Structures are given as C-alpha cells and as structure tokens.
Amino acid sequence: MKEQRLSEITSARSHPVASRDDRYEYLTLTVAPREHVADARARVREHAEYGKWELTRSAVLYGGARRYVMRRRIIRVERTF
C-alpha cells in the first residue's frame, strides 16, 4: 500500500482533486491488486477515525489496483499578540 500526502500547494496543483480547493490537504492511498480489500478498508478507516481524514474519491484502476483520495481541512491559526 502506497501513501502520498499532498499538503504543499505547488505539488497539489497537478493533482486532479487537490487543484480545486486550497483549504484542504490531500492523502492518496494506492492499493495494489494483490493486496486484500479488507486491509485497504481498515487503513482508510484508521485515517478517518484518528487523523480526521474524510474519503473524497475511490476508484478501481486498470489491472485491479484501487486508489482512495482522502482530505482534511487545513486549520490556519493567527497569532494573537
């Protein structure tokens, strides 16, 4: 299973989902066809539960690979003093 995090705006511009909105950071999980779907679902569930990620898109690619795109909102904090 391969994870790719797209938090920088420059690298997110080439991503088809990330280029739409700069308020979110994106995480792409790519699962090979030889890996179990249950393991991929468990990984997506862990990211959603503990990392506050939400599933944006899932796709089955040619050859049987699966891709899950997750996002979470970037919280910008300004200094108060």
Image (tube, helix red, strand yellow):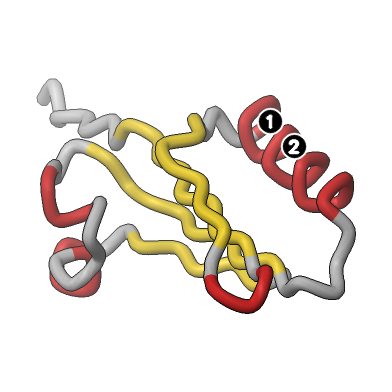
Q: Horizontal placement of 74 versus 30: left or right?
A: left
Identity of the amino acid at label 1? Tyr
x and y, in percent, of residue 70 in the image: 47, 43
Give the amino acid at mark 2: Glu
Tag 1 residue: 50
Where is residue 18? Give x, y as percent. Answer: 23, 53
Q: Residue 12, which numbered label?
A: none
Q: In which quarter of the image is the C terminus?
A: top left
Residue 21 picture quarter: top left
Q: What element carries label 2?
A: helix
**Is the N terminus in the top left, top right, bottom left or bottom right quadrant?**
bottom right
Up-down: is 15 above or below 68? below
Would you place residue 47 above or below residue 26 in this image? Answer: above
Q: CB atoms at circles 1 and 2 under 8 Å apart? A: yes
Q: Quadrant of residue 36?
A: bottom right
For residue 23, side relative to residue 33 (left or right): left
Q: In this orientation, which residue lies closer to the viewer: 48 or 81?
A: 48
Which residue is disc 2 drawn over? 46
User: Cα distance, mark 1 to mark 2?
Assistant: 6 Å
Of badges 1 and 2, nearer the viewer stands: 2
Residue at 65% across / 72% down in the picture? 2
Q: Which residue is drawn at 65% across and 69% down?
A: 65
Q: How far across and how far down the image is residue 24, in percent?
A: 27, 40
In terms of secondary structure, where does tag 1 sit? helix
Q: Residue at x 54, y 28 (%)?
A: 52
* Number of on-image labels: 2
Within-10-Å neighbours for mark 1: few <14, some 14–19, many 20+? few
For image coordinates 77% across by 51% down, the residue present is 40
Residue 25 at x, y = what percent?
33, 47
